[in-house]
Image (cartoon, coloured by chain):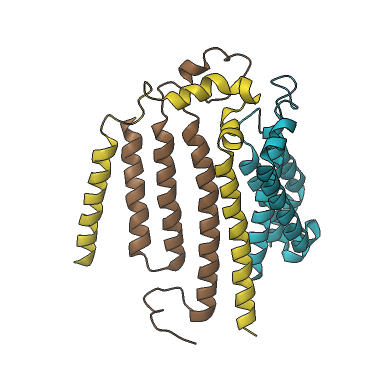
Chain colours: A brown, B yellow, C cyan
Amino acid sequence: MLEIYVGMVLVALIGMYCIVWKKNMIKKVIGLGIFTNSIHLLLIAIGFRAGGIPPIVTRVNANYLALQAVDPLPQALVLTSIVIQLSVTALALGIVTLAYRHMKTLDTERMNRLRG
Amino acid sequence: MKGFLFIICLLVLGGMFLYVFLSPMFGLWERKEVANYYLNNSLEMTGSANLVSSIVWDYRGFDTLGEETVLFTAAVGVFTIVIFGMKRRK
Amino acid sequence: MDIIVRTIVKGLFPFIMLFGVYILLHGHLTPGGSFPGGVIIASGVALIAISFGLRKAERVIKEETAHIIEGLVALLLVLIVLFESFARYVLMPTGMVFELWSAPQVLFLNLAGGVMVSMALILIIFLLMKE
């Protein structure tokens, strides 16, 4: 239970390091994805229950679902957030493609002058 | 020198995160009224066996509408970027 | 691409689409729903686009068709929200609980959302491959 939170903090720190320190533009976009996934991990770990079953009603577990199922609400929020992460990554990659056609390089230390 | 300072700042931030998340306030099942309401009553109110789908499309449908708007905007945005890139190369 | 990749993709493509439609349609009974189903359908078309090229992928679905379908489904979702009381009267829960025709609101909205997600992803992949 505590290990999930420690793992989440480690993944968030790795994501932040990738966004700030790496010079390649595509590695920065990957770091953004890693950081967003760590937040999803935190959200799902809030609804944790020891020895829990998924919140799907079947024929056998209709009467003990409220005592043993995990929390269904953060899973719905994370579903929305995954699609938003997908949209942000698609737009970021579009901008990286445009920047590559203009500056002819993907290195952020070398694209520091205005051209065109 | 810059890298060392950056690692120190990251570790301080990680420590602040851990101090908040390891305090015994997260995930207490006695305080979860909304989750218990969804687990008990959502089968006969919506008729769907998948509770997460019933939350996404029935109880919180407006959030899903906003997210479909974001997805549509992303597709239109990528289209605009590609058309702009093609037009400036002419 | 290579001939091994082309042969495997040509053999696997109907099963991938069938699996995606299965996850879409059973969104109110098993885990899944609109978002994983739409992503699996779009990834099937993306496999064709990567291994066979963009012209063969245009024979599966054209780009203008994807634009038109996505716009129409977005309009349908906005209309469902605007005429919300009428839609809630039409989409009351009917039928037996664990059957396929049980929760019309979740079923129809899953179909609409899945079509929208798959068309948007197919558009993004086609446009990023053209550039």
Residue A54 vertical placement versus C108 (above, below): above
Q: Residue at x 57, y 28 (%)?
A: B51
Q: Residue at x 25, y 33 (%)?
A: B23
Q: Position of residue C49 (x, y in %)?
A: 70, 60
Foreground pick, C39 / C51: C39
Q: How many marks?
A: 0
Q: Position of residue B6 (x, y in %)?
A: 24, 60
Residue B51 vertical placement versus C57 (above, below): above
Quadrant the N terminus of chain A occupies: top left
Tell me if A38 is positioned left or right of A54 in this view.
left
Q: Picture quarter containing residue B43?
A: top right
Q: Residue at x 34, y 62 (%)?
A: A20
Foreground pick, C111 / C93: C93
Q: Position of residue B52 (x, y in %)?
A: 56, 32
Q: Picture quarter containing residue C64?
A: bottom right
Foreground pick, B68 / A65: B68
Res. C42 in view:
yes
Residue B7 vertical placement versus B19 (above, below): below
Res. C44 in view:
no
Residue A45 vertical placement versus B73 (above, below): above
| Residue, far right | C59
Tell me if A103 is positioned left or right of C26 in this view.
left
Q: Residue at x 61, y 36 (%)?
A: B57
Q: Position of residue C82 (x, y in %)?
A: 67, 45
| Residue, far bottom | A116
